[in-house]
Image (cartoon, rainbow, N blue to C red):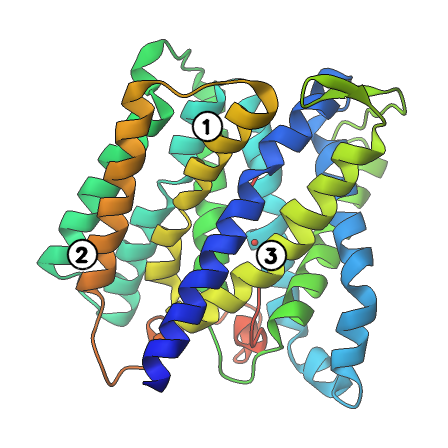
Amino acid sequence: MGDRRTGLLGLLLAVLSAAAFGTAGVFAAGLLEAGWSAGSAVIVRMGLAALALTVPAVLQLRGRWPLLRANAGAVLAFGALAVALPQLAYFSAVARLSVGVALLLEYSAVLLVVLWTWARLGQRPSAVTSAGVAVALAGLVLVLDVASGARLDPVGIVWGLVAALGLAAYFVLSARTEGALPPLVSAWAGLVVGALLLGGAALVGAVPWRSTTSDVEFAGRETSWLVPVLGLSLLAAAFAYATGIAAVRLLGSRLSSFVGLGEVLFAVGAAWLALDQQPGRVQLVGGIVVLAGIVLVRLGERPAGEPAGEVVPDPVAVGGGPDRSRDHGTSPTEP
C-alpha cells in the first residue's frame, strides 16, 4: 500500500512539474519578441528562481550544512549539466529551428535514459516498455506536427541534441537517493550554480546579454515585463524543478522521463490558451498516443519489491560518490 501511495505521489508531482515546465514557452515568447536574448532570459530565470528558494532551502539545511559540503561535486555537476546546459541549448536550438523540432530533439532524451539504465545498470527494457517508447515517441511526433514544414538547420539540430543530453542528465542525476540533499535544496543549489555559470559567461561575452524593461505582449495584451519574468522564474523554474526532482526520486529516472513527455502536451495547451495557437486534429490525436505510451511504460516498469527511487540508483559518480545522490529530492528543462 505504501509503495502504491509513493508511486501515485510521484506521478502527481511529475505531472505538476511537467505542467509548470510547459508554461515556460508562453512566458518566454513575449520576452524574446520584446528583444530579450535567450541567454539573458535563462540567466534571469535561474537567478530569480534560486532567490525564491533561498529561504526555504536554508531552513531545511539548518544543522545539516556538512551535507551540502559533502555534495559539492554533485551540486556542481547538476547545476552545470542538468540545469544550465539544457536551458541554454534549447533556447539556442529554438533560435534556429521551429519550437516543435527543437522540443522533439530535446525529448529524444527519453531514449537516452532507457539506453543508460540498460547499459549502466543492466536494466534491459521489457517488451512492454520498448513498445511504450515507440508509441510515446510516435505520439510526440504527431503532437509537434513536424511534417508541417520545419526548417532543419544543422547547427540548430546539434543544439537540440545537446539539450537532449542535458535533459537526460537531469533525469539520471536526479534519480540518485543515497545521502542525497532534500529535493528543494537540490533545486536551489542547482539553480544557483547554473545562474552563476551562465552569468559569468555573459560577463565575458560568451553568452549574449540583451534585455529591456519595456512592456511586452503576454496572453494577447500589453503587460509589464515583470509578469512573464516572474512566471518564468517562479512557476516554470522554482516550482517546476523542486517538484520535478522530488518526482524523479520517487519514480526513478526512466519512468519520470516518460511522464515528462507530458510537458509537450501542457506546452501546446498553454500556447493554445495564452497565444491562441490552436492545435490541429493531428496534434490532439498525438496527445492521446503519447499518454498511451506513458501507460505502457508504466506497465513495463519493474513491479513490486523494488523501491521506485532505486530504478536508477547509482547511475553516475559525477563529482564524487554521493554525487547527485545528495539531492534527496534533487532536481531540471525546460525549457
Left/right placement of residue 82 relative to residue 108 reads right
Left/right placement of residue 330 relative to residue 97 reads right
In this rendering, the answer to whether 11 lies above or below 180 is: above
In this rendering, the answer to whether 201 lies above or below 54 is: above
- The disc placed on residue 33 is none
Kind of element beneath mark 3: helix
- Which residue is denoted by mark 2 in the rendering? 129
User: CB under 8 Å between callouts 2 and 3?
Assistant: no
Looking at the image, can residue 316 be seen?
no
The single residue placed furthest to the right in the displayed view is 213
- The disc placed on residue 241 is 3
Kind of element beneath mark 1: helix
Left/right placement of residue 328 relative to residue 218 reads left
Kind of element beneath mark 2: helix
Check disc 2 and give the amino acid type: Thr
Quarter of the figure with residue 329 = bottom right
Comes first in the chain, label 2 or label 1? 1
**Where is residue 280 drawn, in percent x and y?**
35, 18
Looking at the image, can residue 325 be seen?
yes
Quadrant location of the N terminus?
bottom left
3D distance between C-alphas at marks 2 and 1: 25 Å
- The disc placed on residue 102 is 1
3D distance between C-alphas at marks 1 and 3: 20 Å
Mark 2, Cα crowd under 10 Å, few <14 / some 14-19 / many 20+, is many
3D distance between C-alphas at marks 2 and 3: 26 Å
